[in-house]
Image: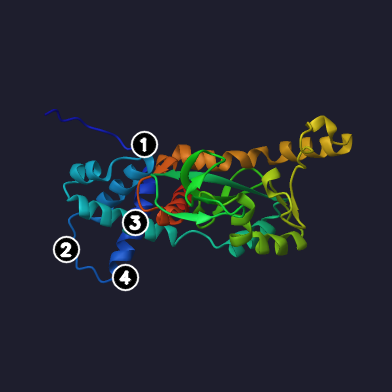
């Protein structure tokens, strides 16, 4: 057996931030001092290793000197504590208006997971896998992201099964609030998958069925090009979160936890300097 030293590539203040949250949570639930196998700081290191490295929980628990069951319990506890710090959509939109942000950018992504049992009958009357995304050809969950005009991640939604289209997920989680914000002067930019979303949600127009973009009117082509250029920064939101917090690339926990995991990653990302 070979022993080696490793370094967690996360700024120290993020570890301290999570450790303080965990310590406050322990005081809130009345955990006796010294009754845990790990203190708040070492628990924070275990959790951040999982988010950053997408590590095996069994291996992380072994490295920390705790059982696999304890490792999972510590991980889920930290996810809950972090997700509770994520901003509400109404708070986010109010903050954007206060800061004078010109627009927000809406996008969706698939966070992959292991194959999940479950089927349903789609609109065409066919039985399909609920968690399978035909667009991405993978199993996972659809999560909606909202970013500022400069690409800064602002908000993430609860997770919907992977077979859910972006516009359906958006209607469920954010469109009513975005309509109100648009009426108050804060429009939303989105991709063509949100066509038909409603007033205040600006998106490129799709090419005619069986045709090419050249069949669009010149004004429409120009509008599409300008819109895609303005919202290009928003395209990096999901990629930034997935590359920085690699656990989001493929979740091996219960898919019902994906929304909380994404919100936890959003909170951690917000304090990264």
Q: Depth check: give the residue in front, 178 or 257.
A: 257
246 to the left or right of 231: left
Q: Mark 2 or mark 1, which has the lower sequence index?
A: 1
Seen from this angle, which residue lies furthest front? 125
Query: Which residue matches tag 4?
Result: 28
Q: Mark 4 or mark 1, which has the lower sequence index?
A: 1
Query: Which residue matches tag 2?
Result: 35
Q: Mark 2 or mark 4, which has the lower sequence index?
A: 4
Question: 248 above or below 130?
Answer: above
**Residue drawn where x is 31% and y is 40% of the image:** 55
Q: CA distance from mark 4 to mark 1?
A: 30 Å
Instruction: Provide residue 177's location: percent of width, then percent of height.
Output: 66, 63
Query: Which residue matches tag 3?
Result: 78
Q: Mark 3 or mark 1, which has the lower sequence index?
A: 1
Q: CA distance from mark 2 to mark 4?
A: 15 Å
Disc on res. 269: none
Q: Quadrant of the N terminus?
A: top left
Q: SS of the residue at dot 1?
A: loop
- Residue 186 falls in image quadrant: bottom right
Instruction: Provide residue 199's location: percent of width, then percent of height.
Output: 77, 58
Q: Say if mark 2 contacts mark 4, CB within 8 Å.
A: no
120 to the left or right of 36: right
> Which label lies toward us, 4 or 3?
3
181 to the left or right of 13: right
Circle 1: is it few (<14), some (14-19), or many (20+) Cα within 10 Å?
A: few
Query: Which residue matches tag 1?
Result: 9
């Amino acid at each position: 057996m070979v022993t080696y030293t490793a370094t967690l590539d996360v700024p120290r203040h993020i570890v301290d931030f999570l450790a303080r949250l965990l310590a406050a949570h322990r005081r809130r639930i009345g955990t006796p001092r010294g009754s845990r196998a790990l203190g708040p700081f070492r628990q924070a290191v275990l959790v951040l290793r999982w988010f950053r490295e997408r590590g095996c929980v069994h291996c992380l628990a072994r490295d920390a000197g705790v059982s696999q069951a304890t490792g999972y319990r510590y991980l889920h506890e930290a996810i809950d504590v972090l997700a509770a710090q994520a901003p509400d959509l109404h708070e986010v939109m109010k903050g954007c208006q206060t800061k004078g942000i010109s627009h927000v950018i809406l996008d969706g992504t698939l966070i992959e997971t292991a194959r999940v049992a479950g089927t349903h009958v789609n609109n065409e009357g066919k039985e399909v896998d609920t968690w399978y995304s035909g667009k991405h050809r993978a199993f996972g969950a659809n999560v909606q992201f909202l970013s500022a005009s400069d690409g800064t991640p602002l908000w993430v939604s609860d997770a919907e099964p992977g077979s859910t289209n972006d516009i359906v997920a958006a209607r469920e989680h954010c469109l009513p609030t975005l309509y109100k914000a648009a009426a108050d002067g804060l429009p939303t930019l989105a991709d063509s998958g949100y066509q038909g979303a409603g007033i205040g949600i600006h998106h490129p127009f799709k090419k005619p069925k069986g045709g090419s973009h050249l069949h669009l009117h010149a004004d429409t082509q120009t509008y599409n090009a300008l819109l895609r250029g303005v919202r290009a920064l928003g395209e990096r939101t999901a990629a930034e979160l997935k590359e920085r917090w690699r656990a989001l690339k493929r979740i091996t926990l219960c898919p019902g936890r994906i929304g909380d995991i994404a919100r936890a990653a959003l909170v951690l990302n917000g304090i990264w300097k």
